[in-house]
Structure formats: structure tokens, C-alpha cells
Image (cartoon, rainbow, N blue to C red):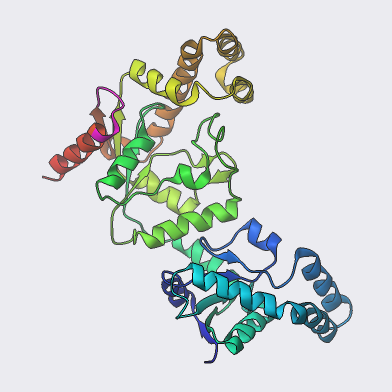
Amino acid sequence: MGVQVVEIEEFLKLAKDYPILDVRSPGEYSHAHIPGAISFPLFSDEERAKIGTLYKQESREAAVREGLDIFGPNMRRMTEQAEAITSSQGAPQEKTLLIHCWRGGMRSGGVAWLLDLYGFKVFTLEGGYKVYRNWVLNMFEKRHLIRLVGGYTGSGKTSILQSLKKKGYQVIDLEALASHKGSAFGNIGMPDQPTPEMFENLVAMELYRQNSQNKEVWLEDESQRLGTVNIPNGLWQVMLQSSVSFVHVPFEKRLEHIVSEYGTLPKDRLVNAITRISKKLGGLEAKNAITYLEEGKTAEAFSILLKYYDKYYEKSLHKKPAWQQSVSFIDCADTDADRNADTILGHNAATVV
């Protein structure tokens, strides 16, 4: 058939229908990869390191010979694994695979040759993962059509996004991609956060899938930092300039919501989280919040935290350029997500008219 080398845009279009095999080492894949790609390593981390050392200290030929010694005995296993992957994708008769390594060099070339020889239709990415990373970073320099759902902590903003999505609107949940809800308690009970590089890959892919340069996308009005990752600066600058639908929910209703969401989490994790922000919260307030938690007075503890986050969010809101023109305050009686989503949409429609 012959291996076809394609550029990044064509590669991503093909990825909508066919599996991507990432033939880099497990460590490279674990650090960050194209979302949806399957780890299909030609070499283990140790083998890659050994080959790299041979290349630097001896010669290219010595490194290639070592690579062939490893590759040869694994050829049958790799074809069988590729068969299993295409079969599980639901279209085994097409037997089409997309392959990439770090720079589009010998690793992807070797695996592509083998699978093409076996009978697969194979496409490789010109320039490899390195080109994909450039594509990711360029994605954040483009102009995106963004609308934001804002509101104080406990307003149920994430649930509103989910409701908007159910209603057919385009939504990107940055907190889900970051595996962090933005506050001191953000990662408790959630999976490990992705690396900063992987977070960028996830966000860029969502922007691409949702065609956000031409179609409006809803996001939550976030701080730039979400735990150990940051919203990419280019996208963050767009968010600062975007209009905000601020849902204004009464304090007591927000307190009820936040207690129901976080109140059942392990007490020691909550105490550790309060301790981490004790300087910002104030020593006495932090001590009181921890005491309330230990006494089982969860609502009293979270009341202290909500007041702190209200002040923090209000300061960040006022830092937005021309915030008085870009922020619409929308009164909501409680945290009913579907009703509040409808209220936001109704308010926006009225504003447009």
C-alpha cells in the first residue's frame, strides 16, 4: 500500500475515524500525548535510554543495530496488538492506523513499515509529536468565541455548564480537564491532575473539536491557575475580554450547595486544605473553620470559607478590562442548574434584541 506521510491538520481529521498509535516510550506518553492516542511503544524507557546513549557515545549505526535487536523479536506481537486495536474500533476491514513518534523519525518509520508490510493502511505524522505541540501552542494564539458563566463559589456554575450542554450548546469544562475545581478543596476526591503539558493538549483539542473560532463556546469564569496547571495565557487573555453571565445566588443557598458537595469529603483532607490557605484566610478564621469541622459543624466551617472566596472572586472580577460593561449580573433564587441556565439564555437573548 505504501505509508502516507501527512501534515498535522490532515492527521487530526483522520483521527476522527481511525486510532492513533503513539510509538514513543511509556514515559514520554505518560508525560503528555495527543488526547485519544493509544500507547504503542516501540521501546521501553530503559531501552530508549540505552539506544540514546549508544547514539551519542558510539555511532548512529550502533544505535540502529541495538534498536533492531529489540524490534525484531517484537514484530509479531506488535502486528497482533494492532489487529486487536483495529478490531476493537469497530471497522477491522479497513485496518487503518495513524502513527507518530517524537519527530516523525525512525521509531514511527519502523513501526509504519512493519504494519504497512503486514497489510494495514498507515498514515504517519510529518514532524511527529513535536509538530503537534506547536499546533497546540498556536491554537491558543487564535481568537475564540467565548462566553463565560460566572458567580460566587457554591453557585453551581459547573452544573449550569452541564445543563447548557444538554440543551445543545457548546461547552468546555476546564475544571474537568484539569481534574480540579479551583478552590483549596479542588482536587479532593478527583483523579490525579494531568501534567501542565497534557492539560494544554486537552484544552487545545476541545477548542479544535468545537470549532471555537467560528462557533460560540461556554466556559466557567475561572482563575488562571487550577491546582498545578494554568489556563494557557493566550486563552486566558481571551477569557478576560469575554462577556460574563454572573449568576447571583443568595449566600444561604450557596452554602447549602457547597456543604452538600464537599461536606462528606474526608475530614482530614478538608483540614489539610484549610491549613494550606491559612495565611490568606487569616490565622483566627482558619483556626475557627478547623474547630468547626472537628466539632461536626460543617455549615459553620464552610460559611467562613465562602466569605473568603466571595472577596477573592470579587477582586478578580473587578480586574477584568471594562468589567462593568462585560459582566451581566443575573439574580437566581437558588442553585437549580436547569432553571438558571434558562435564565442566562433568556437574559442573553433579551440583551441581543
* Image x and y of residue 38, in percent: 57, 65
Looking at the magenta stretch, what is its main secondary structure? loop
Tell which residue pokes out farthest to the top in this image.
Answer: 295
Residue farthest right in this picture: 58
The residue drawn where x is 45% and y is 15% is 303
Q: Is residue 157 above or below residue 214?
A: above
Q: Is residue 230 left or right of residue 151?
A: right
Q: Position of residue 309 (x, y in %)?
A: 46, 24
Against 72, residue 244 (above or below) is above
Residue 172 in the image: state x and y as whole percent: 39, 49
Q: Is residue 22 magenta?
A: no
Q: Is residue 279 left or right of residue 302?
A: right
Q: In this view of the protein, can residue 140 be seen by the observer?
A: no
**In terms of image quadrants, where is residue 67?**
bottom right
- What is the x, y in percent for residue 80? 62, 75
Q: Left or right of 173: which side holds 339? A: left
Residue at x 50% of width, y 35% of height: 182
First to last magenta residue range:
332-338
What is the tally of numbered marks visible in this picture? 0
> Quick one: 346 or 313, which is closer to the camera?
346
